[in-house]
């Protein structure tokens, strides 16, 4: 670097993301340690993608970091946007509608209501009922670890971020159709580490010892890859990344499914090379 780039700093960014056209999730790791080229950096300790849940007008997510390994997220920077149901559909014009910033340690936020007469676009808010049937409202939740106050985040949200994780989910336009938050649901199973290229520990979320529920691994098409049983202790199980024939599964996204019917719980497992 010369002239006006003398004060520039190099940093390394690694991204693991959904490989489908939906780009539903991504997790990003930034190494800001100063270096000069040539140099080698190894990026590890990524956040997990958050699991976004809508309970009527409240949105929440589970922990994305492993305490003692990754730093705790400090802020959630969320966005509501209009997007096509089918990725790449040019008949629907994507639009960013709202940005929502909330402390990440609350593990959620309540969808704000806009009072009559509040400042806004002259044409008013978009009514998705009046727009093409091929569109949807999408919530993007970004959990990251920037430092500083709300004013600092508004000015430079990514200034010193080292960990960021994103998940996109379609908003339920009728909030009453969302699950009743007063009903106690068993937590979704957790996977550590995730992403992974080797053995993973599956925490089933029921807190009971013994293989009392069906545990299955599916691929993205819904095909059964392997059924797991035995070796369950304190609600935990280990998967070595192989299928029913003992062969290592290829890199990609897999679904861990626990239970059946209305009690079925699931989460995604990301296998990398």
Image (spheres, rainbow, N blue to C red):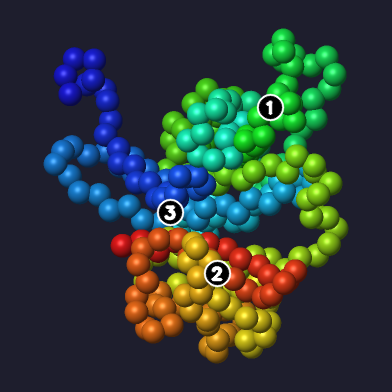
Q: Is residue 225 visible?
A: yes
Where on the picture, by quarter, is residue 229?
A: bottom right
Q: Nearer the viewer, mark 3 or mark 1?
A: 1
x then y, percent, for residue 245:
39, 84
Eyeballing the image, is 269 above or below 230? above
- Say which quadrant the N terminus sits in: top left
Tell me the residue that label 2 is attached to: 256
* Depth check, front residue: 110 or 5: 110
Residue 131: numbered disc:
1
Residue drawn at 59 percent across, 71 percent down = 257
Residue drawn at 60 percent across, 54 percent down = 51
> Answer yes or no: do the residues labelled 2 and 3 have beta carbons within 8 Å?
no
x then y, percent, for residue 255:
53, 66
Eyeballing the image, is 199 above or below 45? below
Q: CA distance from mark 2 to mark 1?
A: 36 Å
Q: Secondary structure at mark 2?
A: strand
Q: Secondary structure at mark 3?
A: loop
Q: Residues within 10 Å of mark 3 (few under 14, many from 20)?
A: many
Q: Residues within 10 Å of mark 2 (few under 14, many from 20)?
A: many
Tell me the residue that label 3 is attached to: 46
- Say which quadrant the C terminus sits in: bottom left
Q: Is residue 256 left or right of residue 207?
A: left
x then y, percent, for residue 20:
44, 49
* Depth check, front residue: 134 or 25: 134
Q: Earlier in the sequence, mark 2 or mark 3?
A: 3
Residue drawn at 64 percent across, 88 percent down = 210
* Depth check, front residue: 255 or 5: 255
Q: Is residue 111 left or right of residue 135?
A: right
Residue drawn at 73 percent across, 26 percent down = 130
Q: Earlier in the sequence, mark 3 or mark 1?
A: 3
Eyeballing the image, is 82 above or below 6? below
């Amino acid at each position: 670097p010369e002239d006006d780039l003398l004060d520039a700093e190099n940093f390394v960014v690694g991204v693991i993301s959904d490989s489908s056209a939906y780009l539903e999730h991504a997790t990003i790791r930034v190494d800001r340690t100063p270096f000069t080229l040539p140099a080698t950096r190894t990026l590890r300790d990524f956040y997990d993608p958050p699991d976004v849940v809508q309970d009527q007008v409240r949105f929440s997510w589970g922990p994305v970091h492993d305490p003692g390994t990754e730093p705790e997220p400090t802020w959630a920077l969320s966005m509501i946007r209009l997007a096509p149901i089918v990725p790449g559909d040019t008949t629907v014009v994507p639009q960013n509608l709202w940005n929502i910033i909330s402390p990440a340690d609350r593990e959620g936020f309540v969808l704000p209501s806009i009072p009559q007469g509040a400042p806004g676009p002259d044409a008013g808010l978009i009514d998705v009922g009046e727009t093409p049937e091929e569109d949807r409202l999408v919530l993007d939740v970004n959990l990251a670890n920037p430092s500083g106050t709300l004013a600092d985040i508004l000015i430079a949200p990514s200034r010193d971020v080292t960990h960021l994780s994103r998940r996109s989910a379609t908003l339920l336009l009728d909030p009453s159709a969302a699950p009743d938050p007063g009903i106690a649901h068993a937590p979704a199973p957790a996977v550590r580490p995730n992403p992974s290229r080797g053995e993973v520990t599956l925490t089933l979320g029921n807190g009971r010892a013994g293989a009392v529920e069906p545990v299955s691994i599916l691929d993205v098409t819904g095909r059964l890859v392997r059924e797991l049983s035995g070796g369950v202790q304190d609600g935990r199980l280990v998967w070595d990344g192989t299928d029913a024939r003992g062969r290592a599964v290829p890199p990609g996204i897999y679904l861990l499914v626990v239970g059946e019917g209305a009690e079925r719980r699931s989460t995604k497992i990301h296998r990398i090379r």
